[in-house]
Image: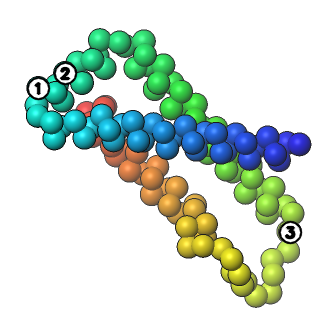
Amino acid sequence: MRLISAKIIMALSGLFLIVFIIGHLLGNLQIFLGPEVFNAYSELLRQYPITLWSVRILLIAAFASHIVTAIYLANVNRQARPINYSQKHNVKASLASRTMLSGGLVLLAFLLFHLAHLTWR
């Protein structure tokens, strides 16, 4: 039961992060509508600090739960077969699934750069 719960948490936190990225992209694409529209959007965000900080706290919780759950699931997977195969054959594994860890680390590095550059200054 814990394994199913962990996979549900992983999926829901990932879905929340994807929905946030889409919303963030749509908000930032308003720059192409002109400086007045884009500045009005940023002022709207600043007018509701409770909402802004609620979303930030939810994002931190989603990232933390996604990372912790990924580590837990990787450990469960590793414990399921403690002895490696003599030869590794990827039958139906896609490139995305084989590079999930490195892709996640690249995204985390970009996120930290993005926050340092645009939020923390």
Q: Residue furthest front?
A: 33
Closest to the observer, 25 or 120: 25
Give the residue displayed 42% in from the left and 12% down from the top.
50
Q: In this view of the protein, can residue 63 be seen by the observer? A: no
* 78 to the left or right of 100: right
Residue identified by numbered label 1: 36
Residue under the point 61% across and 66% down: 97
Tell me what residue is drawn at x 57 percent, y 42 percent: 15
Q: Is residue 4 left or right of residue 45?
A: right
Q: What is the spatial separation of the Cα atoms under label 3 and label 1, in whole angstroms?
A: 58 Å
Q: Amino acid at mark 3?
A: Arg
Direction from residue 98 to residue 114 in the image, left or right: left
Q: Which callout, 3 or 1, points at the residue further toward the start of the chain? A: 1
**Nearer to us: label 2 or label 3:** 2
Q: Residue furthest bottom?
A: 87
Q: Do the numbered discs 2 and 1 sit on residues whose CB atoms are within 8 Å?
A: yes
Kindly indicate the quadrant of the structure image that contains residue 41.
top left
Residue shown at 60% from the left, 73% from the top: 94
Helix, strand or loop at mark 3: loop
What residue sits right under mark 2 in the picture? 40
- Find disc 3 in the rendering and name its residue: 81
**Residue 31 pos. (x, y %):** 18, 37
